[in-house]
Image (cartoon, rainbow, N blue to C red):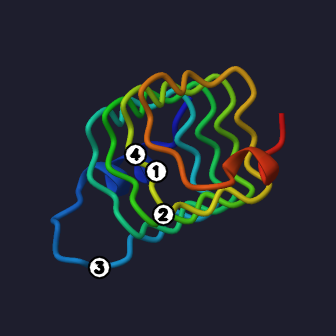
Amino acid sequence: MADPDDLARAKSVDNSGDRYMLSEADLSEADLSRVNLPYADMSYANLSGANLSGAYLLCANLSGADLSGANLRDADLGRANLSGANLNGADLSGANMPDGWESVVRS
């Protein structure tokens, strides 16, 4: 389950344009649907089983993140860094994915 402090940080975004630092955060099984985290650093975060449906993750750094089993339906991951990310079993239906993402993720 998600770490309560990490979840609070992820949900308390203020759209100020700051780069949200969630590197190595435990957000497993968290409900982050429709969250607005452009340019967030979520490298090596545990997002396994998380609900990120409709999330706005434009240019987010998700390198090495565990997104296995995550719901990314209709999420915007345009220009996100997915190098080494685990998307095994993730629902990508309707998601806007960055160019070439298939060649850099783990499955």
Residue 60: x %, y % from top left: 48, 63
Rendered location of residue 77, percent (x, y): 46, 50
- Identified at 16% across, 76% down, the residue is 16
Q: Nearer the viewer, mark 1 or mark 4?
A: 1
State the SS at label 4.
Answer: helix
Residue 6 vs 29, above or below: the answer is below
Kind of residue at badge 1: Leu
Label 2 element class: loop
In the displayed structure, would residue 39 be above or below residue 77?
Answer: below
- Numbered mark located on residue 59 in the image: none
Query: Looking at the rendered structure, which numbered label has been put on residue 60?
Result: 2
Q: Looking at the image, is mark 1 or mark 2 earlier in the sequence?
A: 2
Q: Which badge, 1 or 3, comes first in the chain's sequence?
A: 3
Of mark 4 and mark 2, the one earlier in the sequence is 4
Q: Secondary structure at mark 3?
A: loop
The answer to whether the residue labelled 1 contacts the one labelled 3, judged by CB atoms less than 8 Å apart, is no
Residue 102, horizontal then vertical, whole percent: 74, 44
Dot 1: within a 10 Å radius of its alpha carbon, few (fewer than 14), some, or many (20 or more) residues?
A: many
Q: Dot 4: within a 10 Å radius of its alpha carbon, few (fewer than 14), some, or many (20 or more) residues?
A: some
Tell me the residue that label 4 is attached to: 7
Neighbor class of circle 3 (other Cα within 10 Å; few <14, some 14-19, many 20+) is few
Residue occupied by mark 1:
77
Sequence-first tag of 4 and 3: 4
Between label 4 and label 3, give the one nearer the viewer: 3
Mark 2 surroundings within 10 Å by alpha-carbon count, few (fewer than 14), some (14 through 19), many (20 or more):
many
Q: Of the numbered discs in the image, which one, if any, rests on residue 18?
A: 3
CB under 8 Å between callouts 4 and 2?
Answer: no
